[in-house]
Image (cartoon, rainbow, N blue to C red):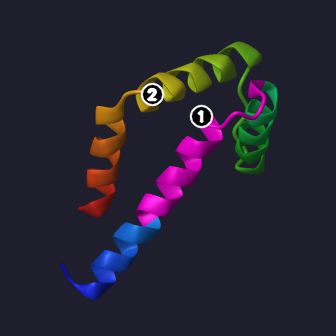
Amino acid sequence: MSRVNSVLALLGGAAMGAIIALLLAPAKGEDTREKISEVLREKGIKLSKEDFNKLIDSIEARFRKKDDIEEAAEEIDE
């Protein structure tokens, strides 16, 4: 793997880690959901409360499994 690819893989892994940390951090769920909601609003994405909760639940379910996290890291590395 070239040096540039290694750096990009490292940065991608760090970004993925930051997202996972936000979702799994011991911060109150309400605070974390507010941060995610704020980012979505900044991007022009508006969801109903029900749809937002479904989105968060699906993200949490996906990244709670170790295999899924490792698979996501491998996809970033490619």
Is 7 located above or below residue 75 in the figure? below
- The answer to whether the residue labelled 2 contacts the one labelled 1, judged by CB atoms less than 8 Å apart, is yes
Q: Which residue is found at the position 53% from the left and 26% from the top?
A: 60
**What stretch of residues is rendered in magenta?**
12-29
**Residue bearing the label numbered 1:** 24
Q: Quadrant of residue 2?
A: bottom left
Q: Which residue is found at the position 78% from the left and 28% from the top?
A: 28
**Residue bearing the label numbered 2:** 64
Disc 2, SS: loop
First of labels 2, 1 by sequence position: 1
Q: Position of residue 16 (x, y in %)?
A: 48, 52
Residue at mark 2 to residue at mark 1: CA–CA distance: 8 Å
Q: Is residue 68 left or right of residue 37?
A: left
Is 76 located above or below residue 62 in the figure? below
Which amino acid, by three-letter code, is at mark 1?
A: Leu
Q: Which residue is found at the position 77% from the left and 50% from the top?
A: 42
Q: Quadrant of residue 68?
A: top left
Q: From the image, give the main secondary structure of the stretch colored magenta.
A: helix
Specify the quadrant that holds the C terminus.
bottom left
Q: Position of residue 31 (x, y in %)?
A: 81, 33
